[in-house]
Image (cartoon, rainbow, N blue to C red):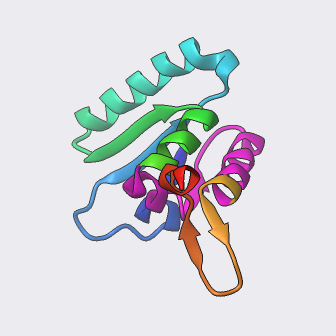
């Protein structure tokens, strides 16, 4: 479970929702999807406003390359629970494949850049 955006910073805005990415390894997809469903249900029952997604690393990177809102949420992530190596892999892949760093700025590598 990964906090993203304000939840990743540990500084959510007042009255904002809690943004979570339920990040899973492919081998655990079925088991993890069931667990994520239960956590989401429990949060809703507790009246916690929740923004969430359930994805693996590949799907997260691919979507972040296509959707700037997803990409900006991944600028700041924080592992809340689970495999630290999986979250490190996500951070490395997002940094390399979504955000291109040069000396002057950080810019989004979108799928549009690949077509030109």
Expressed as whole percent of the image width and height from the top left, the position of residue 55 reads 52, 32
Q: Nearer the viewer, residue 103 or 83?
A: 103
Pick the front one: 92 or 30: 92
Quadrant hosting residue 113: bottom right
User: Horizontally, is 16 left or right of 82 in the view?
Assistant: left
Q: Main secondary structure of the magenta part?
A: helix
**Residue 102, x across and y down, in percent:** 69, 78
For the C terminus, the image quarter is bottom right
Per the image, is 82 magenta? yes
Quadrant in which residue 7 is drawn: bottom left
Q: Is residue 109 above or below residue 21?
A: below
| x 54%, y 40%: residue | 62
Residue occupying the far bottom of the picture: 104
Q: Is residue 11 magenta?
A: no
In the displayed structure, 39 sits above or below 73; it is above
Q: Residue visible at 39% across and 51% down?
A: 19
What residue is at 31 percent from the left and 45 percent from the top?
Answer: 50
Q: Is the residue 63 above or below the residue 30 in the image?
A: below
Write down the quadrant of residue 26 in the picture.
top right
The residue depicted at 60 percent of the width and 82 percent of the height is 105
Query: In this image, 41 relative to 64: left or right?
Result: left
- From the viewer's side, name the closer residue of 9 and 46: 9
Asked whether residue 94 appears in the rendered view, the answer is yes
Q: Is residue 70 above or below residue 86?
A: below
State which region is magenta.
67-95
Residue 100 placement (x, y as % from top left): 65, 66
Question: Which residue is the extreme one toward the front?
Answer: 116
Name the residue nearer the viewer: 2 or 93.
93
Location of the N terminus (image quadrant) = top right
């Amino acid at each position: 479970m990964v906090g993203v955006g304000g939840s990743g910073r540990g500084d959510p805005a007042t009255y904002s929702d809690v943004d979570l990415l339920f990040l899973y390894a492919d081998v655990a997809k079925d088991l993890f999807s069931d667990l994520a469903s239960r956590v989401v249900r429990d949060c809703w029952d507790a009246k916690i406003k929740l923004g969430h997604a359930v994805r693996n690393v590949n799907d997260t990177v691919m979507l972040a390359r296509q959707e700037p809102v997803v990409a900006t949420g991944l600028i700041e992530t924080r592992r809340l629970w689970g495999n630290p190596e999986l979250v490190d892999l996500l951070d490395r892949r997002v940094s390399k494949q979504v955000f291109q760093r040069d000396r002057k700025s950080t810019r989004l590598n979108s799928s549009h850049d690949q077509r030109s």
